[in-house]
Image (tube, helix red, strand yellow):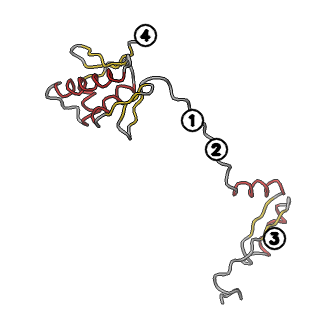
Amino acid sequence: MGGSGRPEGESLPLLIAVSADPEQRMRLAELLDGVGPLLMVSGLDELRRLLDEGKPSPPAVIEPEPEPDGLKVDADRLVASWSDREVPLTMLERDLLTHLLTEPLQVWTYEALHQAVWGTGHLRSTADVHSLVKRLRRKLADLGNAVTIDAVRGIGFRLTDHQNPVRRTG
């Protein structure tokens, strides 16, 4: 038994005091000090609010956004898809295509692409980027879509949808 006359491990009941008068709440707190856990509130509305805060919220219903038509990359399965067709991707191809899809029409430098795919901006030659783009172009063509990777001479590459060209303004 503990010093309170209760067996050890037995929990004490929660005492709830409701009073709008702050002085009365202070006197109650002094009188009930050490008796057990005490919750003091100024009114029933405050008590209801406190009790509601402890309840778990109903689960949020999240409606999935409809997938936009077009080229999609499933990073986990390592595939690119267009309509009902899929092509397998290597991890390098996935990383390159995913990076190009982040900003379609943006011209990506060889260095930026090398950083995104191989994790280093240090580039001895552009041959590795060219080789990867060549393989990825073939796979995009196998999907039968109009999206391709266009070369921007001396700079790098960009992803372009030749069927639905988007023109930048400004």
Dot 4 crowding, Cα within 10 Å, few <14, some 14–19, many 20+: few
Q: Please name the residue that numbered disc 1 is placed on.
A: 64
Q: Please name the residue that numbered disc 4 is placed on.
A: 167
Distance (Cα) linking label 3 and label 2: 41 Å
Question: In this rendering, which labeled residue sits more in front, label 3 or label 4?
Answer: 4
Q: Which of the pair 18/142 is nearer the observer?
A: 142
Q: Amino acid at mark 4?
A: Arg
Quadrant location of the C terminus?
top left
Dot 3 crowding, Cα within 10 Å, few <14, some 14–19, many 20+: some
Mark 4 or mark 2: whose residue is earlier in sequence = 2
Mark 3 or mark 1: whose residue is earlier in sequence = 3
Q: Please name the residue that numbered disc 2 is placed on.
A: 60
Q: Amino acid at mark 3?
A: Leu
Per the image, label 4 sits on a secondary structure element best described as: loop
**Residue at the image point whose x is 24% and y is 26% from the top:** 135
- Tag 3–tag 2 contact (CB < 8 Å): no
Q: Please name the residue that numbered disc 3 is placed on.
A: 28
**Residue at the image point whose x is 21% and y is 15% from the top:** 154
